[in-house]
Structure formats: C-alpha cells, structure tokens
Image (tube, grey):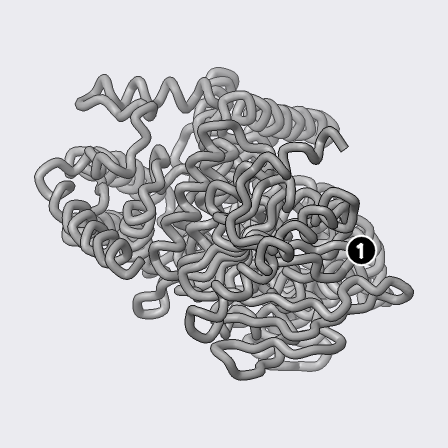
C-alpha cells in the first residue's frame, strides 16, 4: 500500500496508459513488424498466448516482463528460432512466415542475443563480417571490410582501440557495441536487443543506450528486452509488458510512471489502488 | 524526427569523408573519433617496434619466437657435438625427410585450429601407401591413378570420421582413436601374405618423391629460381596491399617494415637455396611441401572457408549464429586431415619405395602432432598458422637427424622428442594464460 502511494502523487497524464499507447500507435504509419494473436507451445507449456506486438520504424519498443514471461520466446519467434504455432506475423503490413533464422534475416530482422556470440580469436573486422565476408575475385577483401567497418563504427560513434585487435582484448561494453554494430552490417529494418545492458558498468551502459538512440535516428525499429526500468525509461518509446505468456499492457513511456510498468510486470495492476485510480479518472472524464 | 535523422545523416557523411581524408596525410593515426584515447599508440621508429615487441612477448603473444630460439639452440648443440650436422649434405637430408611428416602435419593444423585432434593420421598414411602399392604392384594399375585413388581414400576416411564426430557427436578423440587401430588393422590385413611390397622406384610418383629426384634436375638455377619467386611474390603482395590500403584510407604497413621483412625472407631463402645447391639441389618432395604450405596458408587466411575454420575454432555458437554450417566445416576439416595424411603416406612410400608393415606406425602420428604444436599452433583451437608445420618439422627432423648422426638409440630419440613436445605444449598453455592475464586471451 505504502509502495503504491506515489502512484497517486504523480500527476496523471493521459491515463489509462494502454489506450494512450494505442492512440499513439495509430497515428504513425503501418508497423514494420506486427504480431497478431501469436501463440507458441512447448510440450505441456503454453509459452505464448495470443500475443500482440507492433513495432514501427524509428521506434524503440521495450519488451519487459518477469523471468519466464515469454520475452525470449517471443523474440525467438521473430528471429525464426522457434516457428509460431498460431497467429500471424506481418511485415510492412503483409503476412509472412518465419520458419528459420534465415527467413528472419532475409526480411531484415537482426538479433543480438545476450551471449553476444562473438569469436574471441577473430578481430573486430572479422567478427563484424563473419558469415558475409566481402569478396574480391573470390578472395576475402580485408581492405574494403576494414574501411567499411571503420565507417560504420564512426557513424555510430563507437570507440574501440582498433578494428584489428581480437575481440578477446575488448571490454564487455565494447563487445556489446561490436555485437550491435555487427547486427547492422546486413542493413536490417528491425533490430532485436536481448538484455544489452545486463552485466555492464555505468559508462558502458550509457554507451549502449546512446547507441540504441542512434539506431532510432537511423529509422530502425528496435525491440529492446530489459529488466532495467531506468534503461527502459531512458530510451524506449513504448513499453510492451508480457506476463505469463500474455500481453499485459502496452504503455507510452512518456506518459507512464515506472511504478505502473512494474505493477503490470508483476501482475499487480488489478489491485485496490489501480481500481481507485481508474475509477477516479473515469469520473473525471465524465 | 525526420529533421534529426537528416542532421545525423549529414553528420555521418562528413565523418565518413574525414575517415578517408585524415589517414592520407598521417597513416599511423586513425581518425580521432574511432580510436580509444586509452590505447597506447605505437611509437615511431625502431624504438616503437621494440616496445611493441616486448609488450607482445610479455602479453604472451609469442608467435614463432620460441620455436626459432629452440631451433637455434638445437642446431648449436648438435653442431657442437658433431661438426657434420650443419654440413650441406645433412641439411639437405633434413629438408628432404621432413616433407613426409610435414604433409601430415599440415592436415593436423586444420584439425588443431578447430581445437580437436586426429589420432588416425599415422594409420591413414600407412594404409594409403599400402593401397597404392597393392594397386600398382598386384593389380598393375597406373601409378598416378593409384596415387589419386589412395588420396581420395584418405579424404573419404577423414570425412567418415568427421561425420561421426560432427553428426553423431562422438568425441573426435575417440573416433580417431578407433581409426588409429582400425585403419592400421586394415593395412596389416592387406599386407598380410607378403609383409612388404616393394614398389618399382621408377614408377611416376614414387620416383618423383624419391630421394634422387630434384627440382629442375639439380640445375643450380633451380633453387635460386624458387627463392627469387618467393621474394618477388612477397614484394608484389606486400606493396599491392599497401597501395590498396593507402587508397582506401586504412592503416598500412610502412615501406621500411616491408623492406625489412622482404630482406629477411630473401636472405633466408637464398641462403637455403645456396646450401641445398651445395649438396644435391632442392628435392622435389620439399618443393611440393612448400607449395602445399603456400596454397594452404592462402586458403586459411584469404578465403571464406579458412575464415569459417577459424570461426568454428574460436566459438562454435558464434559461428553457428553467423550462418556457418558447423558440421560441414568439421567434416571437411577431418577430410582435409585424412587427405594430407594419405599424401604423407605417398611421401613415405616414395622415400622407401615400398609399403611395409611398420608404415605409419609408431611415432609418425606423435611427430606430426608435435610438429604442428611446436610450430606454434594452439591445441586449444582458433590460433595458429600452417607455417607451424614447417617450423615444427624443422625442429623435429633436426632432432631425429642429429640423434642419428650421434648414433643415439631410438629410445633416446623418443624421450627427447617427447620432452620437446611437452615443452611446446607447456609454452602454448603458459602463453595462453598470460594472454588471458594481458586481456588478449
């Protein structure tokens, strides 16, 4: 009860939040990526039930939820790791089927997983272009790769000692930004970041968040999984909450307090405080 | 929103121009915005190279330093014990006999780069030489066709073992241990009735790989031609790359450094050619071995396949996510190992002009592994170069030949080679540790 106190103290801006978010979404054009009623089942576990998600170009959507809420599963369905059982995935407004990672990459979905999956023994350039090396007469074109890598890191204002040192010599934050930069090599439209700031220090977290903002400036759609509310508040435009494999609200970050998001995550939305708040706002509307 | 994105794009454009312009006048300094201010930039001049060298050694990036020092020590000791050791004839012997095991070691470098091991190479080499002998002598097959088939059998055996490892998930150690026994058994069964098959030494490939076959029929110019070719190729390659890098505005190797490298290579190769010419000439086995090294080095460093091998060795998950077909890389790597083992077997057959029960047995396998590891290829995968097969074989063959000169027993040879192998692995492990400590592991 005491914890919920600040909720009332905050001046309400356009609550209920779910509706506010919806309205904002409707304003902009067709979403780049939309999930409609997506369900996924693993044996006896219903991991996702009727999940809806919309991501627009130039928008950062934070996907939040408790452990086991289905965030990772949802992201993996988009990335093509787990094909969906039911529902529709729309790309630029038309339905598509994503059955394997290759399909997702072909559409323009780039995923940066939590374990960055970089090759420690290869240098930064080698990692950025791993699996899609630039060729010149059938031979790896190190010069063009290095030139392009430097340009890319430059435009993202990524600072690393040298593009020719092995990944093993980079710090955790530097590895994270290299992993994100790597996702951009294929010119994606949607970038999925799985816990990009977990296990990072203050300065590195700031670096990564800066980078997320730069992705938005490049008009990419970003799906950001995070447990850190401060990060979410800092960079996200919209927060989509998952709880036990279902949607539990979608909020516009500007108009929502951290407590509201947390209560949606923990499932505390339906309690005395929120009911009273809801009643009061409907009364005020009348 | 659109305004900001425009601004940022324009900003990005100017930054891009800066990158291409800035390095043109100052090659060593990268554009300021990319370089971490904490990075210790290499100082200019000789002192800069020295500080970088000491830093690398302290950081555990030893490269081929231990093996070069080891080789000098070994040569010094043997020369002190027997002054015939550094004679042209003996060095020529070393250069000839190292090519057979060296070929096997090339294949092993691939496997070691994955962080795996192939214990079957000795048996496969023996089996290949036996098959060759059986086909040529007992069935009258064309020698070149038999050679090709024997190598294909080696590739197939490697692929089969790789398949068990990659698809079934049996540890490579166990699969190839089974191969070590199984293929040796098959060889013994094939040789069963006769025991030894002598191959007519004038038949094409056997003659070519024999001890009396020399590049350009012992013409003095032959060795110098090869040395000159190596130098010219290095010059063209290095300056070509420097020009392209300058044009692209990325850091390049200064002319002075290239000249020093080329100079060192020129001295080494021309001295080697002179020494070999002083004896009999450059043996064809050695020429084939060196050609294989150059080709394989190119494949590993400059092709997507080589990049895939390094990637799988550095991180399987990362490689898989990058869209690399990991099982395929593993199977092909073991196939390559099997293929080179078979080629090594052909070299052995050429040396003795026969297929014997002892072919590929005993220490062939250990020597090949030792060569690759002594040369600096890490047992832990992802680090190494095919040139380690050459450097390692120089060490191994020097020890073998030197101990032969001193009339030492095989027992002593085994003990010493074992000790050297242990030393190499210890250096590998320790340097890996200090690389970790220096943030480079």
Visible residue check, residue B14: yes
Q: Residue at x 40, y 60 (%)?
A: A58
Q: Is residue B49 above or below residue B171?
A: above
Instruction: Write down the chain letter for disc 1.
Output: B
- The percent coordinates of residue A236 (x first, y second) are 49, 49
- The percent coordinates of residue B425 (x first, y second) are 63, 29
- The percent coordinates of residue A171 (x first, y second) are 48, 31
Q: Is residue B271 above or below residue B20?
A: above
Q: Is residue B138 above or below residue A81?
A: below
Residue B338 vs residue B36, the one in the foreground = B36
Is the C terminus of chain B in the top left, top right, bottom left or bottom right quadrant? top right
Find disc 1 in the rendering and name its residue.
B175
Q: Residue at x 42, y 37 (%)?
A: A207
Q: Residue at x 51, y 23 (%)?
A: B74
Residue A279 vs residue B38, the one in the foreground = A279
B1 left or right of A14?
left
């Amino acid at each position: 009860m005491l914890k919920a106190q600040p909720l009332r103290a905050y001046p309400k801006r356009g609550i209920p939040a779910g509706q506010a978010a919806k309205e904002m979404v409707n304003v902009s054009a067709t979403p780049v990526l939309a999930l409609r009623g997506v369900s996924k089942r693993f044996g006896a576990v219903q991991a996702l039930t009727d999940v809806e998600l919309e991501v627009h170009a130039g928008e950062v959507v934070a996907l939040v939820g408790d452990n086991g809420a289905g965030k990772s599963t949802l992201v993996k369905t988009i990335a093509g790791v787990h094909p969906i059982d039911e529902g529709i995935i729309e790309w630029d407004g038309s339905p598509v089927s994503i059955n394997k990672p290759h399909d997702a990459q072909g559409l323009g979905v780039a995923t940066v997983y939590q374990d960055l999956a970089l090759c420690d023994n290869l240098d930064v350039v080698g990692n950025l272009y791993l699996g899609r090396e630039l060729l010149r007469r059938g031979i790896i074109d190190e010069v063009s790769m290095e030139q392009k890598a430097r340009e890319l890191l430059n435009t993202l204002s990524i600072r690393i000692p040298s593009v020719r040192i092995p990944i093993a010599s980079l710090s955790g934050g530097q590895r994270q930004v290299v992993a994100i930069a790597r996702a951009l090599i294929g010119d994606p439209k949607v970038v999925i970041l799985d816990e990009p700031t977990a296990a990072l220090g203050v300065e590195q977290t700031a670096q990564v968040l800066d980078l997320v903002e730069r992705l938005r400036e490049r008009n990419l759609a970003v799906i950001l999984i995070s447990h850190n509310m401060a990060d979410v508040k800092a960079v996200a435009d919209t927060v989509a909450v998952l709880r036990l494999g279902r949607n539990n609200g979608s909020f516009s970050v500007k108009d929502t307090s951290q407590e509201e998001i947390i209560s949606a995550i923990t499932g505390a939305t339906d309690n005395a405080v929120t009911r009273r708040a809801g009643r009061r706002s409907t009364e005020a509307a009348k | 929103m659109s305004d900001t994105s425009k601004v940022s794009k324009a900003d990005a454009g100017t930054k891009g121009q800066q990158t291409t312009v800035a390095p043109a006048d100052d090659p060593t300094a990268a554009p300021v915005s990319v370089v971490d201010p904490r990075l210790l930039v290499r100082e200019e001049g000789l002192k800069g190279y020295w500080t970088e060298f000491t830093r690398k050694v302290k950081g555990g990036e030893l490269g081929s330093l231990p093996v070069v020092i080891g080789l000098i020590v070994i040569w010094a000791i043997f020369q002190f014990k027997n002054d015939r050791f550094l004679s042209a004839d003996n060095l020529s012997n070393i250069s000839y006999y190292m090519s057979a095991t060296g070929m096997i070691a090339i294949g092993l470098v691939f496997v070691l780069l994955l962080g795996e091991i192939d214990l079957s190479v000795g048996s496969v080499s023996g089996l290949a030489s036996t098959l060759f002998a059986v086909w040529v002598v007992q069935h009258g097959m064309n020698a070149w066709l038999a050679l090709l088939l024997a190598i294909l059998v080696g590739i197939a055996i490697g692929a089969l073992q790789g398949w068990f490892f990659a698809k079934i998930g049996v540890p490579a150690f166990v699969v190839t241990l089974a191969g070590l026994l199984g293929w040796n058994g098959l060889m013994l069964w094939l040789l069963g009735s006769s025991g030894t098959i002598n191959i007519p030494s004038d038949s094409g490939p056997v003659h070519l790989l024999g001890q009396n076959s020399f590049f350009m029929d012992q013409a003095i110019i032959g060795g110098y031609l090869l040395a000159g070719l190596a130098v010219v190729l290095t010059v063209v390659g290095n300056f070509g790359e420097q020009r392209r890098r300058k044009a692209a505005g990325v850091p390049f190797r200064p002319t002075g450094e290239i000249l020093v490298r080329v100079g060192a290579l020129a001295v080494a190769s021309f001295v080697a050619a002179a020494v070999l010419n002083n004896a009999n000439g450059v043996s064809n086995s050695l020429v084939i071995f060196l050609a294989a090294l150059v080709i394989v080095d190119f494949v590993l460093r400059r092709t997507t396949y080589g990049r895939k091998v390094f990637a799988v060795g550095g991180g399987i998950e990362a490689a898989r996510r990058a869209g690399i077909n990991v099982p395929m890389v593993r199977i092909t790597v073991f196939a390559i190992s099997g293929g080179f083992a078979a080629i090594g077997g052909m070299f052995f057959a050429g040396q003795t002009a026969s297929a014997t029960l002892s072919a590929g047995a005993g220490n062939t396998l250990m020597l090949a592994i030792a060569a690759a590891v002594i040369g600096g290829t890490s047992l832990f995968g992802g680090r190494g170069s095919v040139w380690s097969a050459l450097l390692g074989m120089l060490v191994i063959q020097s020890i073998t030949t030197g101990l032969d000169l001193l009339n030492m027993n095989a027992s002593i040879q085994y003990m010493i080679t074992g000790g050297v192998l242990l030393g190499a692995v210890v250096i590998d492990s320790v340097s890996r540790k200090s690389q970790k400590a220096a943030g480079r592991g």
